[in-house]
Image: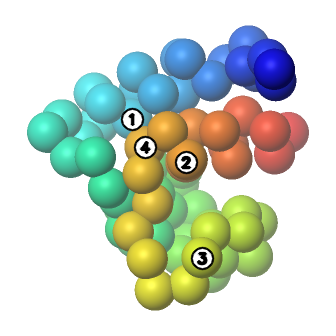
Amino acid sequence: MARERPDYRDLLERLDAAYPGKELLTRDELASFLGVTRQTVWNRYSFPPRTKISKTQAARAISTSG
């Protein structure tokens, strides 16, 4: 079983605080949260095109990216 990255839970809590009541985020919302452009989110993370991104999926991707 894969282990969680150390900052995964912290990122998930921060996403919950930033977007309460939402489970799925757009690339624009994720870009705003990260302080980068939408294009950077597109280039840096391999989310499926034309879909919203779950908070857990976003936290996992951000925590493994560096």
| 3D distance between C-alphas at marks 3 and 4 | 14 Å
Name the outermost residue toward the left: 21
Residue where numbered disc 1 is placed: 15
Q: Is residue 14 left or right of residue 48?
A: left
- For the residue pair 39 and 59, the one nearer the viewer reads as 59
Give x and y (percent) for residue 63: 72, 34
Alpha carbon of mark 1 to alpha carbon of mark 2: how far? 9 Å
Which label is found at residue 48? 3
> Disc 4 designates what residue?
55
* Residue 32 is at least partly visible in this image: no
**Going from the N terminus, do you reach mark 1 or mark 2 first?**
1
Label 2 residue SS: helix
Front-most of residues 27 and 51: 51
Q: Are marks 1 and 2 in contact (CB under 8 Å)?
A: yes
For residue 42, say whether it is visible.
yes
Say which element carries label 3: loop
Q: Earlier in the sequence, mark 4 or mark 1?
A: 1
**Label 4 amino acid?**
Lys
Q: Residues within 10 Å of mark 2 (few under 14, many from 20)?
A: many
What amino acid type is highlighted by mark number 2? Ala
Above or below for 49 versus 20: below
Number of the label disc, if any, that sits on residue 30: none
Name the amino acid, label 1: Leu
Instruction: Judge from the rendering whether residue 39 lies leftward or rightward of residue 27; answer left or right.
Output: right
